[in-house]
Amino acid sequence: MNLYVEQRNDGRPGDGSHNLPFNGDGDGKLDAILASVRTRSDVVLNIGPGLYPFHGVGFYNGYDQLADGVAIKGCGPTRTKLLLTDAVEQGNGNHFCCGLSNWFDGKGGITVSDLTIDCNARELTKKYPNLGAVGINLFGRDNSIQNVCIEDAAGLRKEIIGTLHEE
């Protein structure tokens, strides 16, 4: 099922159709759209041109994860940009944010293409000095990342990476 997201200035939420796309204009709106389709593995979410602030998707963030088999498609890395705007505490004063992710035990089959994810580390480290920020973190098999640019990411110290992946 193809669903569409555009930056709209009419204030209407849209229904996700090609003729009346979801309104992704404003912080939190893309998060709500992603949350509404997160359990649907048959979704191709087509995101139009523009800048889309969001909190990110993934178990690291405490936000909703992508379902296995979902596809997220932009209009090209110079036209569609997702901007991370927050991070969650991981303990010991460390914070983490991730643009797009699935469950740790995910089966995969996720496609991300034709967009940029700006991890916004320069701004977020002002609020969270011990920040780890990544664009995409997918588990499982048959995942595909095509024509994607990741900007302004921040590395984690070695011991933090180890704790994030334990279980």
Image: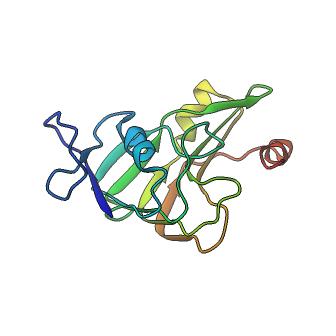
State whether residue 91 is above or below residue 156: above
Q: Residue at x 22, y 38 (%)?
A: 13
Q: Where in the figure is residue 100, as x and y percent of width and height?
A: 54, 52
Q: In the figure, residue 24 lies in which quadrant? A: top left
Q: Where in the figure is residue 156, as x and y percent of width and height?
A: 74, 44
Q: Residue at x 31, y 34 (%)?
A: 26
Q: How is the image coloured?
A: rainbow
Q: Is residue 40 left or right of residue 26?
A: right
Q: Where in the figure is residue 117, as x and y percent of width and height?
A: 48, 52
Q: In the figure, residue 62 lies in which quadrant? A: top right
141 or 91: which is nearer to us?
141
Q: Is residue 33 left or right of residue 166?
A: left
Q: Is residue 161 left or right of residue 125?
A: right
Q: Residue at x 13, y 36 (%)?
A: 10
Q: Residue at x 65, y 60 (%)?
A: 106
State whether residue 124 is above or below residue 60: above
Quadrant for the N terminus, please.
Answer: bottom left
Task: Give the total of numbered labels.
Answer: 0
Q: Where in the figure is residue 147, as x and y percent of width and height?
A: 45, 70
